[in-house]
Image (tube, grey):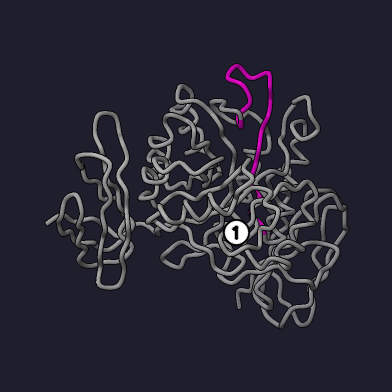
Amino acid sequence: MTDVERWGLLELQVDGPVAMEFHHEDDSAYVESFRDGDQWLIRFMPSLEGTWRYTGAVSGVFTCTPATTRGPVRRSGTTLRSADGTPYHPLTTTWFGTPDNWPEACRALAASPFNRVRLCASADSVDAQVRDLSAVDMVAEIVVDSFVPEVVSRLAAYRNITWCIENTADVRAVAEQIAEYDSGRHLISAHAAADPGVPWLTHLSVSLENLRGVSALRRDYDKPVHVDACGYEGNGSTPDTSLTAQEMLTRIWEGTVRGAYVTHGEWYVDHASGPWSDGGVRPTGVAAQRLRLLREVLDELPDGVEPIDDHRDAPTLAVPGSYYLQYLGEHQFPDRTFSLPAGTYQVEVLDVWNHSVRRTVENVEESLTVRLPGTQYQAIQIRRTA
């Protein structure tokens, strides 16, 4: 009997365009085949451990064994979690390129602070790209402009994908068709949707230059917010492709600490392979490297962290009483005061631009005043230790 791990991939060869059903005592799924060169394949991702049976063009049984990964990304209120329940904090970049540049670009992604990348579904090699990203534990956002059954059937069995619909008037029809064919039940968004609150979209995908707007979007729609376009660091000929590295970096930090997931973009036109986000071989700007500090912070965020309104002049993520992350952006505050329960706290002043950290341990009775260097692009991280 074949063994497939939970959220792994079962691949079966069939004789042509057929449909099959997969059954578990607590779940079932419908899957259609797709053409791969001279052969036809069926792919399926089992969601539950135990015995699965499949019927249709061929019949058989396989055992789903325990997972060795965290599984696909799922919505959890206004946040995201992996299927095993672990909080998921994406740091995304955009790469719309060709197969020729992909091997070098994939190596650059694996060495970067990003754990999610936006890809164009029309690329001939998107199957290989998703597989390569799965090997380095990265999620692929598959951008589509229409419903293509072959694309959905081909990719739905990968655990590391989400869908984003762009440039179509009939969002509902495309979203519902993707959901019907997607046996992996992955997240679906529509970029700049007229009404992102509709139930067939699992999260928001927006274009936003002023990241302060994130707070209202989370409140009004009660869904995760992805800012998939906030601009590009670069020297392009348009306002949105010619941001400074400081502006790119501060937009990402601002939106993140307001509770959104903000995508990095880069558009330097004089690089030999072209702009990174247009399919270049590697990011060459400053922001991509200086986001490593944010990656470290995201990897250590406690479960349950949420934006709070206690500090209206600076966005703040917190688990009140035990954890605070505040971003000060363009402000040059000399200090910041926090009301805290009595206890011992580790305090970190993060220089976001210079990628430096100043750590102290403070004993607090009622409040804590954190001294700052009085320069821009500072953040404060406070953790209760006792």
Magenta run includes residue 275: yes
Label tally: 1
Q: Quadrant of residue 46?
A: bottom left
**Residue 208 drawn at (x, y percent):** 75, 48
**Residue lying furthest left:** 1
Q: In this view, does 181 lie to the left or right of 113?
A: left
Q: Name the residue under label 1.
A: 203
For the residue pair 266 and 297, the one nearer the viewer reads as: 266
The one nearer the camera, 374 or 84, is 84
Quadrant housing the N terminus: bottom left
Where is residue 160 drawn, in percent x and y? 43, 50
At a point 80% along the width and 73% down the height, the residue shown is: 310
Q: In this view, does 122 lie to the left or right of 382?
A: left
In-front residue for pair 78/89: 78
306 up-or-down from 134: above or below: below
Q: Is residue 174 magenta?
A: no
Residue at image position (73%, 49%) is 351
Label 1: which secondary element: loop
The residue range painted magenta reads 260-277
* Residue at horizontal 41 percent and vertical 66 percent from the top: 84
Q: Is residue 382 visible?
A: no
- Mark yes or no: residue 44 visible: yes
User: Of 180 and 366, which appears nearest the observer?
Assistant: 180
Q: Which amino acid does label 1 sit on?
A: His
Residue 326 vertical position relative to residue 343 in the rendered view, above or below = above
Residue in the image at 61% along x and 78% along y? 386
Where is residue 192? Give x, y as percent: 69, 49
Q: Where is residue 252 in the image (x, y as percent from the top left)?
A: 70, 48
